[in-house]
Amino acid sequence: QVQLVESGGGLVQAGDSLRLSCAASGRTFSSYPMGWFRQAPGKERETVASISRSGGNQEYADSVKGRFAISRDNAKNTVYLQMNSLKPGDTAVYYCAARTGYYSGLSSESEYVYWGQGTQVTVSS
């Protein structure tokens, strides 16, 4: 069992940066590939980024490639999402999630077992 708690969301202007954090409970955090997802009002939840258990591999959705960076600190049981050059289209609730098994890039949300409660990111123009 893993419990995930996101933080770091807020209201920013276009072009600003934010760093989201996701703190995990438990001693087996390093055994889980992790992902960040987002859901905008009226839209389906989409995969934003994913990272392997060691942190050595990452994948990004085309919409955020070059602007967002996912990382993890297994000693701190935390995964991060650095978001730069934010756009109004990035406005959404952002969720972190953990999956079991092997890392396989941008997996669908159905592959993820544990979810945080989400943190709101609002980007004004």
Image (cartoon, rainbow, N blue to C red):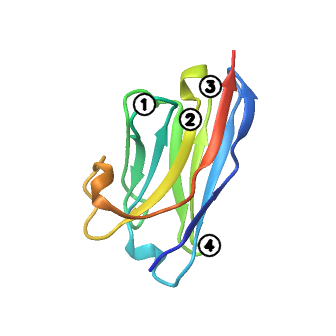
Query: Residue at label 4?
Result: 76
Q: Position of residue 98 (x, y in %)?
A: 41, 64
Q: Position of residue 48 (x, y in %)?
A: 43, 40
Nearest to N terminus: mark 2 or mark 4 = 4
Tell me the amino acid under the disc marked 1: Lys
Q: SS at mark 2?
A: strand
Residue 92 - label: 2
Which residue occupies 69% across, 44% down? 9
Left or right: where does residue 114 sit relative to residue 120?
Answer: left
Tell me how far mark 3 sits from mark 2, CA to CA. Answer: 15 Å
Give yes or no for contact between labels 3 and 1 (Cβ–Cβ under 8 Å): no
Give yes or no for contact between labels 1 and 2 (Cβ–Cβ under 8 Å): yes
Q: Report the front residue among 55 and 123.
A: 123
Query: Residue at label 1?
Result: 43
Binning the other alpha carbons within 10 Å of mark 2 as few (below 14), some (14 to 19) or many (20 upward) gives many
Tell me the amino acid under the disc marked 3: Ser
Tell me the amino acid under the disc marked 4: Lys
Nearer to us of marks 1 and 2 is 1
Nearest to N terminus: mark 4 or mark 1 = 1
Q: SS at mark 4?
A: loop
Nearer to us of marks 3 and 2 is 2
Tell me how far mark 2 sits from mark 4, CA to CA. Answer: 26 Å
